Image (tube, rainbow, N blue to C red):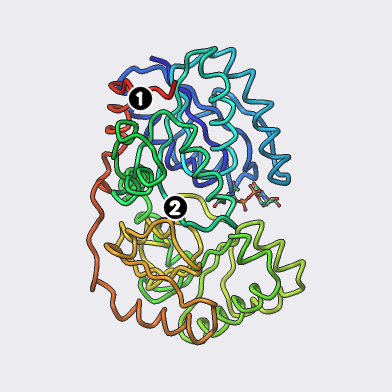
Amino acid sequence: MKVMLIAGARPNFMKIAPILRELKTRAIHAQLVHTGQHYDFRMSESFFQDLGLGDPDFFLDVGSGSHAVQTARIMERFEPVLIEQKPDWVVVVGDVNSTLACALVASKLRAEIGCRIAHVEAGLRSHDWRMPEEVNRVLTDRLSDLLLTPSHDARDNLLREGMADDRIVFVGNVMIDTLFAHRERADALDMPARHDVAPRTYALVTLHRPSNVDDRAQVEVLLDILAGLAERMPVVFPMHPRTRNAIEAAGHDGKLDGIHTLEPLGYTEMLGLTANAAVVLTDSGGLQEETTALGVPCVTVREQTERPVTITEGTNRLAPWPLTRDGVLTAIAAAVAERNGRQRRPDGWDGRAAARIADALSTSRVSYV
Ligand code: UD1
């Protein structure tokens, strides 16, 4: 069996790493394709180093662009690799443009080269079609032979969309495998001390969704919220390049006074800061899950979440919408007060998802065609 794994953007790398390791442990031939959707050292290479990924077997070097340009470029550059390598499985993860682009290429070549497509993190739905990730998720699931789900709600979503039950396999959350594997190393970094904050006294903030940072009015509201938060506790804010660009373009850099802004952090550094935060304020999907696994309160600045299990079983809550300074600050105070109050680690978030993924790839007979 030959398996080709696709990674392109920051949140892919921690999902791919344990799968690659598990396949290699089982002496299964695995190849890694990095599309290059993310390319800055801090968005890409530092994750390869941190996660022990080694060099990718194929690097497509696509870089940034509009959705159409980026997706098309990935497709053009992935197609010859796929034709030449003819893997048995193409494994795509998550919901970024690289996920859909490679699934689409593989789906058109499926019969010709005899490959099948597996989607890791299948079945998550925000039901918000304005999100590019929702488009990527729904279409990738539709194109995939094997739908590997991280939580039980995902199966219901897939069945509702008419997917055959035998294509769906519950494997749990593979990103939590990586979190457990790196927890000790993250603690050893002593990240709070490095940033002059005491454990459990600070808020950790990340923002990068286009709906939050590409909209000038929304950026202003968010910066106002951060200023209010900084009056109550230290605020540590590693900034995604999209966010830094948007804040600078809007001329709002001055509003970050009093906030401890940082360049994007490596995986273990970020884990060290997350595990010790009093509260996390974010619009990231991954952080909603990581805070639940760590038992750290999280307030999500989005209208809805495709990861409802982090609310029903974990430590996440949605900020009241539309966002207001008072609404978010009240939600943060409630989240901090409830720490340890309502947490159960969701089923399958146990550090063994990669083993279940490898089992599914090895035994599954399902085929779309
Ligand atoms: C992408 C994913 C998003 C994911 C996020 C995590 C899609 C549609 N979006 O969003 O789901 O949550 O990654 O980070 O796939 N840039 C750099 N350096 C880089 C990468 C990006 O400076 O290494 C800047 C560029 O200005 C670029 C912008 O960030 O245009 C956006 O990058 P892009 O990959 O298009 O989307 P993200 O916002 O990173």
In percent of the image, x 63 and y 22: which residue is there? 79
Instruction: Name the amino acid type tagged 1.
Output: Leu
Residue 317: quarter of image: bottom left
Considering only order in the chain, which callout, 2 or 1, is on the residue closer to the N terminus? Answer: 1
Q: Is mark 2 within 8 Å of ligand 1?
A: no
Could you say where residue 302 lies in the image, as x and y percent from the top left?
50, 67
Question: Secondary structure beneath disc 2?
Answer: loop
Circle nearer the viewer, 1 or 2: 2
Residue 339: % across, % down: 28, 74
Callout 1: SS: helix
Q: How many marks?
A: 2
Above or below for 58 versus 208:
above
Position of residue 114 relative to residue 148, above or below, is above
Badge 1, how many Cα within 10 Å: few under 14, some, many 20+? many
Vertical side of 49 occupied by 111: above or below: above
Q: Tell me the residue at 59%/80% (across/down).
A: 258
> Are the residues at dot 1 and dot 2 in contact (C-beta closer than 8 Å)?
no
Disc 1 to disc 2, how far (Cα)? 28 Å
- Which one is nearer the viewer's eye here, 67 or 261? 67
Q: Quadrant of the N terminus?
A: top left
Q: Is residue 17 left or right of residue 211?
A: left
Residue designated by label 1: 23
User: Where residue 300 sits in the image (x, y, percent)?
Assistant: 45, 68
* Residue 130, picture quadrant: bottom right
- CB of mark 1 near ligand 1 (< 8 Å): no
**Residue 369 percent location from the top left of the image:** 44, 20
Q: Residue at horizontal 54%, vertical 84%?
A: 325
Please give the label number shown on residue 125: 2
- Left or right, 147 with respect to 135, comes to left
Image point 56% across, 78% down: which residue? 226
Label annotation for residue 134: none
**Dot 2 surroundings within 10 Å: few (below 14), some, or many (20 or more)?**
many
